[in-house]
Image (cartoon, helix red, strand yellow):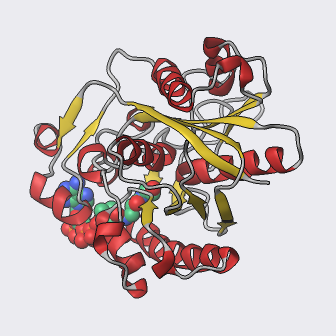
Amino acid sequence: MSFYIAGTGSALPEKVVTNDDLAKFLDTSDEWIYTRTGIKSRHVLTTERLDDLAIQSAKKALEDAGVEGKDVDLIVCATMRGDTYTPSLACIVGEAIGCNAPAFDLNAACVGVLYCMEVADAFIASGKAKTVLIVSAEAMSKLVDWTDRSTCVLFGDGTGAMVVKAGRGRLAGELSSDPDSHVIRMPNFEGLNSPYNRNEQEKLAIYMDGGEVYKFAVNAMGRNIEEVCRRANLTPADIDWYLPHQANVRIIDASLKKFKIDKSKVLLNIAGCGNMSATSIMVLLDEFAKKGTFRKGDKLLFVAFGGGLTSGAAIVEWNKD
Ligand code: UT7
């Protein structure tokens, strides 16, 4: 027994920052950002709290699924950093929706939601849960160095959620990690300052070797698609919809090229959202689910890569009631 997606939700900060807005304080341009990434604008937190937006996403997903908070058996939240280290974002969401089930956060960078799906699958397969709430929430604007044009222009903030229930839906999942931790790196904000260990402080912002990430991403996405299709006994041509991590349109195109997939099957929202780390595929899913894009029985392939370096893919049949 695995799970199907019973409901989705998302909530983004109100403020939209365009590439032209960034060019007012950075040596960059709309032309450079758009042609290299496909990004035009992103949502950025101002006065909102990330946990409030995550709660909104969770409530929308529960309503969409027709599930009450008290009936959720597990909450797992993909995030690199919530508003507080403790309570976890998952616990904050649990309190807001009236749920006393186990709740914890999980950090697998941009691949977080795919790791959450594996956790949900394992809880459901073992009989420990029938209904799981997966939440994703990323405040990338608080993690980047806003003077570093090579990283800050790429990211956006956002939250999403899905309710999954025991039943036919998820056909296969695939996760992996590559030991290349220097390629994307973000030091912890505290912990480097003990009086017993006064090492030189690393800069407290995301560092990234863009070119190396690019190469890793194209390779890993292709490899994960092949592997997850093999596990589901399908070919890439059997997939109805591709939901790739929204980091860069060129990465998406390059990693899918060899499969000769009809481009209309590849869903994108990067132009208006940028890279929202773990939240990207959740917001993408919710957007296209609400548009009525998916038909019962459609096969959705999620694929992502991120810091760690982590990567993964999952195929889920759309069997929402
Ligand atoms: O979720 C994982 C997150 N990370 C990623 O997905 C990043 C993956 N990598 C990429 O998306 C691409 O490597 C980038 C978009 C980061 C860069 O694209 P690129 O085609 O590799 O850029 P490039 O090598 O053609 O250009 C780099 C040049 C450098 O200038 P020089 O040294 O060639 O003179 C940079 O200083 O572009 C310069 N540059 C910029 N110029 C204007 C870097 N950032 C900017 C900027 N505006 N924002």
In the rendering, at what x and y percent does residue 93 appear?
Answer: 61, 20
Is any atom of residue 208 visible in this view?
no
Rendering quadrant holding ligand 1? bottom left
Residue drawn at (54%, 43%) of the image: 202
Residue drawn at (31%, 31%) of the image: 44
Residue drawn at (44%, 55%) of the image: 295
Identify which residue, 130 or 160, lies in the foreground.
130
In the rendering, at what x and y percent does residue 260 appear?
Answer: 37, 85
Identify which residue, 205 or 197, lies in the foreground.
205
Q: Quadrant of residue 85?
A: top right
Say left or right for 293 vs 37. right
Identify which residue, 43 or 313, lies in the foreground.
313
In this picture, is 23 found above or below 183? above
In the rendering, at what x and y percent does residue 299 appear?
Answer: 52, 64
How many numbered marks are there? 0
Identify which residue, 107 or 161, lies in the foreground.
161
Q: If the image is split into quadrants, where does the N terminus sit?
A: bottom right
Residue drawn at (41%, 45%) of the image: 289
Q: If the image is split into quadrants, where does the C terminus sit?
A: top right
In the rendering, at what x and y percent does residue 39 appear?
Answer: 23, 53
Say left or right for 124 vs 200. right
Say left or right for 102 vs 230. right
Is any atom of residue 182 visible in this view?
yes
Q: Quadrant of residue 69?
A: top right
In this picture, is 18 found above or below 239? above
